[in-house]
Amino acid sequence: MKKLKSFVLWLIIPLMLFSFWVVLTLKYVKTEFGLLTLSQQFITSSLLVTRAGEMLKGDIISGEFKSTYSNMGVVAIPFHTFGRINQDRLEFRIKEKNSSNWLYRATYNTDQFQPNEPFPMGFPTVSDSQDKIYQFEIESLQGISGNAVVLYSGYPIYLVKYQFNSHQLSNNNRLLVNFLYHKQLNLINDSDFLIHTVTYLLPLIFYLTLLISKKQPHLFVLLINLTIFSEVFLSKKYNTLLILFLIVTWLIGVSRLRLHSNFSAFQALILFVLVPTALIVQKDLTSVSAEKIATWAYVFLILTIVHKIYESFVKPKNKNTLKGYLLSFSSFGLQLIYVGYFLVKRITNSFSKSTTQTINLSHYFSKYIGKSAVEHSHTAMQKIMSFSNKLKLVSLPITNYATKSGQPILTLLHRMQKIILNILISLGIIWPVWQVIRGFKYCILLYLDFFPSNQLYYYFIKTGAYQIILIFVLVFLIRKTLKRQKGKTFLIIILLFAFQIGERKIFEITTDPFRYKITVWSAKAPKTIGWYEVEITGRNFKDLPFVGQVFVNDIEYDVLTWSDKKITVQVRPGTDKTKKSVYVVDIQGEKSNSVDLETYNLSDYLFKDKVK
């Protein structure tokens, strides 16, 4: 019966979980990528558009790329739908460079486009596409304002896909090996695939962990935390399946490993403490990572309540306590110190001729860090010492001089404690101070770059005054803290971190109204009777190829040059330049403020240039 049980536990169930991982991974690859498909990525900014804003009738997006593989069959372009269902139709056409004929044409209804996601535009497979250069165009056939899409600038890539068939691969071993190699590269370079395949593998990993660890929680708790932080920092989206899986796994682990409810409470506490840390590190008070950490903290808070209820009804015996768990980590540190001490003394005493004797190290360690941790490490250290003596690698000889009250050992430990403590205190003070200095510098540079004049004045009235008030509050609280007898350093570190968060919040609140807003500062044109150019200066116009529109008295004019801070448009002869209102619309349809058109004498302008 035991053999059958072992056979099921160690072979049947792991094989089932492994099969579960393989099947779900293949299903995901088939759904999202295609089992026999390779993809190639290109930068969206390399695409050209005929005009900014919505794709109205006749507007064209064009691009050019070099094909890496054979069997090209799809070009996928990301579009922004403005959160609505649009009724436009887009014509897609593709040809080889320098060819006069299009290889393929097709029309697509925009009502099937997913917001901000690459839409696949397929065509008959081009078997000999490898190492050739292709050009494509996408033209709007029916687009009107308010019922059209636009090239999405927030998605950095567009895709070209290559479709193979099983017959080709099975009859050509070289092609098969090449395909498998590049398919592997495609998948490894896709973060969503890695997140999903690891998620599908977690049941097997945690099952083996619970099976191997028996009643010891160390590896299980470590894997739980690694999984949580991987999901927080590597995935851009919420993974509901993973959250549910970890909740169930934690409850199973609590039951099997007999974990005390303090484990759940400690997990929640650590995660709550990490929320402000994530906000500080990522410089963004709306960061997804901080939200995810807060979500996990609330999850473990609820699990703590469930855990407490479970303990009140079931009342499990021989529970693994949090104190014992933490002491076991202390014992691990002790073991490292022991081994390091043995090795150092073995080397130093190899040159000593003094008489030796054995010292009881546990006696001195227990004085320094307490008996509990030493007792936890005693058994492990006996095994290490026994193994070391058998190999004759290390021993415990020390000189008579070195054994007086065990002073060298205590001195070493005290020094280690002071060094580590000083490092932590220094980091706790230097890190927030450094981040605050960086924040002030970034804030001032933002004002200097955004506003054309009186930058420091705007900085003071919008942001600086609040930051100065916050500094006075910090100084006042630090002075109060210095009068305390105990815990001064710890409280000062907390105040510095709180100040950093407050400074970042002030920056966000005071600069959000203009930091990313498209703004026009001036529009100037020469006094002339012929064609003339209007020079517009401002901020957040976006760089090429994301060209927007320029309107003078609600009439659109042709753009000559376009950059994030400067635009030049051409205005036809005879246009009245008095009392003209100029504004800009970016590629996403956001409208800027309006400014009056200023005029100047061209001769005066040229004279100033010569003087300069």
Image (spheres, rainbow, N blue to C red):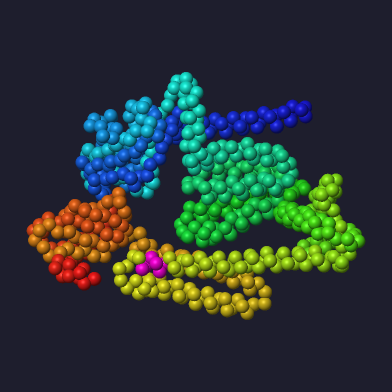
Q: Residue at x 14, y 68 (%)?
A: 603
Question: What secondary structure is the magenta-colored segment mainly?
Answer: helix
Query: Can I make out residue 371 in this image?
Result: no
Query: Can I make out residue 566 in this image?
Result: yes
Residue 131 in the image, given as x and y percentages of width and height: 37, 33
Q: Residue at x 38, y 38 (%)?
A: 159
Q: Image quadrant for the C terminus?
A: bottom left
- Against 495, residue 561 (above or below) is above
- Against 317, residue 98 (above or below) is above
Q: Residue at x 62, y 47 (%)?
A: 224
Magenta-tinted stretch: 443-448
Left or right: where 559 falls relative to 335: left
Left or right: where 18 falls relative to 36: right
Q: Is residue 446 magenta?
A: yes
Q: Residue at x 38, y 46 (%)?
A: 155
Left or right: where 445 falls relative to 244: left
Left or right: where 289 falls relative to 451: right
Q: Nearer the viewer, residue 368 or 506?
A: 368
Q: Where, by quadrant of the figure, is residue 324 drawn? A: bottom right
Q: Image quadrant for the N terminus?
A: top right
Q: Nearer the viewer, residue 554 or 162?
A: 162
